[in-house]
Image (cartoon, rainbow, N blue to C red):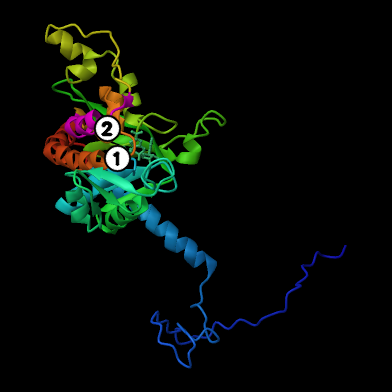
Amino acid sequence: MTPPTMIQTAPVVNYSFAPTEPTQISLKTSASNGEIKFADWDKFQFAPIRESTVSRAMTKRYFADLDKFCESDVVIVGAGSAGLSAAYVLAKNRPDLKIAIIEASVSPGGGCWLGGQLFSAMVLRKPAEQFLENLGIEYEDEGDYVVVKHAALFMSTLLSKVLAFPNIKLFNATAVEDLITRRDETTGELRIAGVVTNWTLVALNHDTQSCMDPNTINCNVVLSTTGHDGPFGAFSAKRLEALGKPRSDITSGFKSETAASNAGSKPSTAGFELGGMRGLDMNKAEDAIVKGTREVVPGLVIAGMELAEVDGSNRMGPTFGAMALSGVKAAEAVLNTIDVRRKQNENCYGGLSLN
Ligand code: AHZ
């Protein structure tokens, strides 16, 4: 039988891998003979590469990052405006902290690429313009509020600054599908001590495949900013509802049944109920989200619109000052609790290594 052949229809070009001087590219429009030329394109050639080199360049860094960040100081769940604002403030103040950001979508940024509906401009009520000034983003001052000409300018600037911090790693296309919990051996208090992750496409297919086990990241504080309810929204809040049964586990500091009965109190059997996001009221909503941003249960800070699901506060729609400033307050809450949570985690299970 004749072996199969592949027919080359295009003309054969002999490609030379001989070392050449890199093509000089200048983006100045210094026209010679009236002609614009940024480079000598006739002689242009990329430096050579083998395909496996590209694979190794990507995978060795990704797996080194997985290895490094599987013990993180802080995990931020959700890379929307609240999560990234918090990441920026945290990393700026504490270059010593290892901060992992887990984002379910391929594209980070959450709902912050447009101002509202399909409109570009982004409105922030004062005093959120101070955050813009810190980031170096221009705005128009309209009195009580300011306007950035495109929401994408805010998000791309914030994102680029966050990604440039050496102590931050963004794992996108990765979903948090559960929380790691610890029951304190002395107080009986339950706390959050990490996250359970999976590729988002896997997380979305648990119902169509047999069990696909996840990966984990241990940390001292989880900051959840997964937005309001939706296919991937309000994740930690919804998980708390299940973890928090009976309700006393949440409200009285996650006391175990034994610890609670030792203390003479009976744990309630009522479930932890989410408040559920209320209708739109810009004036009430923005203050409520910023003021309410806190460590909701030990080891878990919740910020941004996810908090509206916990507290039953209003939505604010297309104004973004509360997302930025809730991020600032979340960073403060993380920094105020992290040392206590670290100590608790270090003492857990006889001081199992946290390296
Ligand atoms: O993909 C989600 C988005 O980028 C991500 N996310 C959600 N669940 C996740 C999970 N694992 C990993 N389980 C997850 N990532 O979280 C991000 C949330 O961003 P967002 O912009 O939706 O939330 P935000 O709180 O930063 O900003 C909300 C802004 C408002 S207000 C509002 C209204 O009032 O109607 N609507 C929006 C979008």
In this rendering, the answer to whether 77 lies above or below 29 is: above
Q: Does residue 71 appear in this view?
A: no
Residue 243, x across and y down, in percent = 31, 21
Foreground residue among 246 and 66: 246
Image quarter for residue 308? top left
Foreground residue among 230 and 288: 288
Identify which amino acid the numbered label 1 is placed on.
Answer: Thr
* Numbered disc total: 2
In this rendering, the answer to whether 59 lies above or below 254 is: below
What residue lies at 20% left-to-right and 35% top-to-bottom?
Answer: 290
Residue 235, x across and y down, in percent = 36, 30
Please state if 330 lies on the left or on the right of 198 as rendered: left
- Considering the image in quadrants, where does the N terminus appear? bottom right
* Dot placed on the residue nearer the N-terminal end, 1 or 2: 2
Q: Which residue is mark 1?
A: 319
What residue lies at 32% left-to-right and 22% top-to-bottom?
Answer: 276
Please state if 125 lies on the left or on the right of 26 as rendered: left
Residue 9, x across and y down, in percent = 76, 72
Give the structural element (helix, strand or loop) at label 1.
loop
Give the structural element (helix, strand or loop) at label 2.
helix
Residue that lies at the very extreme toward the right in this rendered image: 1
What residue lies at 19% left-to-right and 32% top-to-bottom?
Answer: 287
Identify which amino acid the numbered label 2 is placed on.
Answer: Met
Magenta span of residues = 277-295
Dot 2: few (<14), some (14–19), or many (≥20) neighbours within 10 Å? Answer: some
Calculate the distance from the C-alpha at mark 1 to the C-alpha at mark 2.
8 Å
Dot 1: few (<14), some (14–19), or many (≥20) neighbours within 10 Å? Answer: some
The stretch drawn in magenta includes residue 198: no
Residue 238, x across and y down, in percent = 35, 25
Q: Which residue is mark 2?
A: 282
Is mark 1 in CB contact (under 8 Å) with mark 2?
A: yes
